[in-house]
Amino acid sequence: MGSIVERKRKDGTVSYRAQILIKSKGRIVHQESSSFDRLTTAKAWLKRRDKELEAPGGLDAARRKSGSVGDVIDDYLKSTGGDIGRTKAQVLRKIREEFAISDIPCDELRPRDITDFARTLSKGRSASTVQNYLSHLSAV
């Protein structure tokens, strides 16, 4: 069910990305990954997550997200407790209040939704502003 990919970092060290991809009827129903400094740690994580996902109700629990993108933004803003910059907080609040992407349930969010969001942003905004919005959203 899972795989481990060795990756070289810029500084020359190696990391291991453990990936889990579950398909049903040719469609991806669950995907997750995590990076580790040691191969043994990556293998242990992969084994544990495989067992959790194969348990009765495990896949359903993993697929359950915490609401819409807007809900996750709200949770992120609350959890940081003001430890983020004013600009980042302002951008996230603006995304939450003014853009349709905030209404999309997390488990239904697709790459196309993000590209549509970027296209919407690019109307009347510079490329660097669009990049800032996407960067702040990716932190969430």
Image (cartoon, rainbow, N blue to C red):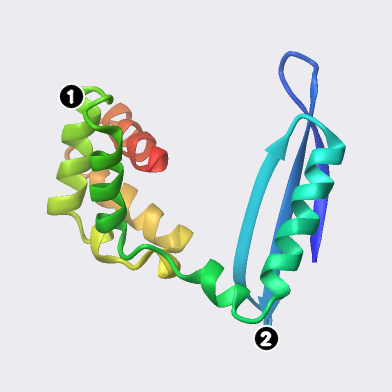
Q: Given the image, on which type of amino acid does mark 2 rest?
A: Lys
Q: Given the image, on which type of amino acid does mark 1 rest?
A: Arg
Mark 2 and mark 1 residues within 8 Å of each other at the beta carbon: no
Position of residue 65 in the picture relative to residue 84 (left or right): right
Is 26 in front, or is 34? 34
**Residue 50 sits in quarter:** bottom right
Q: Secondary structure at mark 2?
A: loop
**Residue 9 sits in quarter:** top right
Mark 2 or mark 1: name the one nearer the start of the chain: 2
Instruction: Give coordinates of residue 83: x percent, y percent.
Output: 27, 24
Residue farthest right in this picture: 40
Residue drawn where x is 31% and y is 57% of the image: 69
Residue drawn where x is 82% and y is 54% of the image: 3
Residue drawn where x is 13% and y is 52% of the image: 98
Q: Residues within 10 Å of mark 1 (few under 14, many from 20)?
A: few
- Above or below: residue 7 compared with residue 108: above
- The residue indicated by pointer 2 is 25
- Above or below: residue 114 compared with residue 23: above
- The residue indicated by pointer 1 is 86
